[in-house]
């Protein structure tokens, strides 16, 4: 195995079990590893820190897979996938749910690999070159281990260019999925478009939060902003008085309508607005509309640390608009999936929005990504979704 030797003092994060080695930490290489090859990582004295895969095109030159020198063979991948599957059985799924994140990259000891399960189909994302090179082998293994009918690739994600990779999507192993895969989440039914939908087809990370928000929906006039395929709407459908989905995507709204009907909810209770939330919420305010429950679940605004300031303005703006549409005593459920904005900053932004519109915001619940997106303490980068449910007076 070729070797990557670190500069003196730069081994600390690896000792703390952080699985990334940045290019600036590398002193020299021993051998000539090809992109994606396995390398042993040594500290300045030559002690072994672990084994990982190498990508000279990325700022993260090594992603560590193990903390000792060992073979990374089929048995290794099988064990890691097995552990990820067992974790989901214990923590994240029950009989009423057949869609969930099966493998969450670094958090499951599988840097660069995301696998989502949608009933009998799996969706794989190769976020790094090291995984990209092995994805075919992994897909075959996953098919065998899970009994799924097919593995479809959705490696069309923002991080791929940083690894020197282009976007790819398509079937990897087994049968290709149908246009709509029907899944169950907490006993509710959804159709997922694996090939064309956003991300891998569905926002699995909001599973627990959809339940929490629904708990505030009894008798409510609800506005579900950034609705996508209507997850929050369907959960609230049985208790709410009326639900409006708002999204810029006609496809998303159509899927939300279909999901509403699939769960036997009355069509006359559902309405929708297609357009830019920043424009449409102003329009609703000008018309004097008032809601009991407003959900704001925008797409990622900050893709890097450099975008935090402008993203913060976006979050403040959208939350001011949402707050203004709530009747006194109404409930705001608001989220941010920008990893670069932590919970503390998110709460500050909300506070700023509340002050500017002259409302008092009382946080009732703090929310995060569900337990199938676990957070390994040595890898805080995995935390990205945060939200609050708040009473607005
Ligand atoms: N709440 C959803 C996920 C939301 S994803 C769920 O539970 O599944 C974000 C959504 O915002 C996407 O559907 C996207 O189409 C929509 N979107 C992005 N920018 C928008 C904008 N400016 N105005 C309205 N919708 C927008």
Image: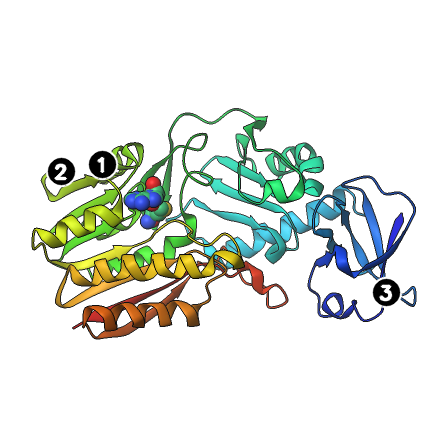
Q: Is residue 97 left or right of residue 157?
A: left
Secondary structure state at the residue bearing disc 3: loop
Residue on which the image places disc 2? 267
* CA–CA distance in space, label 3 to label 1: 57 Å
* Residue 239 appears in the figure: no
* Residue 257: numbered disc: 1
Kindly report the distance in space between the C-alpha atoms of the residues bearing marks 2 and 3. Answer: 63 Å
* Residue identifier under label 3: 43
User: Would you say the residues marked 1 and 2 are in contact, meaning their CB atoms lie under 8 Å apart?
Assistant: yes
Report whether 5 appears left or right of 118.
right
Is there CB contact under 8 Å for labels 2 and 3? Answer: no
Say which label, 1 or 2, has the lower sequence index: 1
Q: Quadrant of residue 155?
A: top right
How many other residues sit within 10 Å of disc 2, few (<14), some (14-19) or many (≥20)? few
Q: Residue at x 9, y 54 (%)?
A: 289
- CA–CA distance between discs 1 and 2? 8 Å
- Residue at image location 39% in from the left, 49% down from the top: 299
């Amino acid at each position: 195995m070729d070797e990557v030797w670190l500069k003196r003092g730069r081994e600390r994060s690896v000792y703390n079990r952080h699985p990334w080695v940045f290019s600036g930490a590398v002193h020299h290489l021993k051998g000539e590893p090809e992109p994606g090859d396995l390398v042993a990582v040594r500290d300045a004295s030559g002690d072994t820190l672990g084994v990982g895969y190498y990508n000279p095109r990325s700022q993260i030159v090594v992603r560590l897979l193990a903390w000792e020198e060992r073979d990374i063979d089929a048995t290794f991948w099988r064990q890691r996938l097995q552990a990820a599957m067992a974790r989901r059985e214990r923590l994240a799924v029950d009989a009423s749910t057949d869609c969930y994140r099966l493998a969450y990259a670094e958090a499951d000891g599988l840097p660069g690999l995301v696998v989502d399960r949608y009933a009998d189909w799996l969706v794989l994302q190769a976020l790094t070159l090291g995984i990209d090179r092995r994805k075919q082998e992994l897909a075959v293994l996953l098919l065998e281990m899970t009994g799924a009918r097919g593995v479809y690739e959705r490696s069309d994600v923002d991080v791929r260019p940083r690894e020197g990779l282009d976007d790819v999507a398509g079937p990897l192993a087994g049968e290709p999925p149908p246009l709509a895969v029907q899944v169950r989440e907490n006993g509710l039914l959804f159709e997922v478009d694996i090939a064309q939908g956003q991300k891998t087809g569905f926002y699995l990370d909001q599973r627990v939060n959809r339940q929490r928000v629904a708990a505030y929906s009894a008798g409510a006039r609800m506005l579900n902003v950034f609705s996508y395929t209507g997850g929050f709407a369907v959960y609230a459908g049985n208790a709410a008085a009326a639900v409006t989905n708002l999204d810029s995507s006609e496809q998303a709204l159509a899927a939300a309508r279909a999901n509403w009907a699939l769960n036997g909810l009355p069509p006359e209770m559902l309405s929708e607005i297609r357009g830019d939330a920043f424009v449409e919420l102003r329009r609703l305010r000008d018309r004097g509309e008032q809601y009991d429950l407003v959900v704001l679940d925008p797409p990622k605004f900050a893709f890097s640390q450099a975008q935090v300031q402008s993203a913060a303005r976006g979050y403040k703006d959208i939350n001011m608009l949402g707050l203004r549409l709530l009747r006194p005593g109404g409930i705001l459920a608001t989220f941010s999936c920008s990893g670069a904005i932590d919970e503390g900053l998110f709460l500050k932004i909300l506070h700023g929005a509340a002050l500017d519109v002259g409302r008092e915001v009382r946080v009732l619940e703090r929310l995060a990504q569900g337990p199938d997106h676990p957070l390994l303490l040595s890898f805080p980068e995995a935390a990205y979704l945060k939200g609050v449910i708040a009473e607005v007076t």
